[in-house]
Image: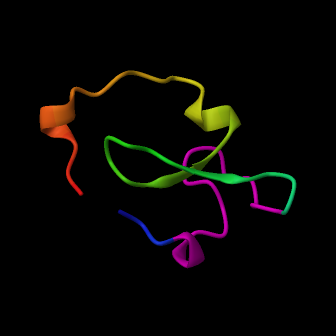
């Protein structure tokens, strides 16, 4: 799980995060991405969620 403070840009598209362009954590890989790059959503079965 990537900490919020380690991400200042989206690793997929390179856009800078701002107050208006929020950070989203990928539940599969834990990376921080922007809203536009997190549009592909899937349901992950409970047994695969690591906390």
Name the dominant secondary structure of the magenta segment. loop
* On screen, residue 21 above or below 43: below
Which residue sits furthest bottom?
5
Name the side, left or right, on which 28 lies relative to 34.
left
Query: Residue 3: x percent and y percent?
Result: 47, 72
Q: x, y (%) of residue 40?
A: 51, 23
Note whether 5 is above or below 22 in the view shown.
Answer: below
Residue at the front extreme of this rendering = 46
Residue at figure coordinates x 66%, y 62% from the top left: 9
Colouring method of the image: rainbow
State the residue at coordinates (66%, 70%).
Answer: 8
How many labels were placed on the picture?
A: 0
Residue 47 in the image: x percent, y percent? Answer: 12, 35
Residue drawn at the location 41% of the way across and 66% of the way down: 2
The residue closer to the viewer here, 23 or 51, is 51
Quadrant the C terminus occupies = bottom left
| Magenta-drawn stretch contains 15 | yes
Q: Tell me: residue 22, above or below residue 45.
A: below
Q: Quadrant of residue 28?
A: top left
Answer with left or right where residue 44 lies relative to residue 5: left
Q: Where is residue 14 in the image (x, y as percent from the top left)?
A: 67, 53
Give 43 or 29, whichever is nearer the viewer.
43
Magenta stretch holds residue 49: no
Q: Which residue lies furthest to the left in this view?
A: 47
Instruction: Residue at 40%, 21% (x, y): give it.
Output: 42
Q: Between residues 42 and 12, which one lies in front from this camera angle?
A: 42
Quadrant containing the N terminus is bottom left
Find the magenta span and give its range.
Answer: 4-18
Image-based side of 7 in relation to 15, left or right: left
């Amino acid at each position: 799980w990537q900490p919020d403070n380690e991400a200042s840009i989206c690793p997929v598209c390179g856009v800078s995060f701002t107050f208006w362009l929020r950070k989203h954590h990928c539940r599969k890989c834990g990376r921080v991405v922007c809203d536009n790059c997190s549009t592909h959503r899937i349901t992950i079965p409970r047994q695969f969620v690591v906390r």
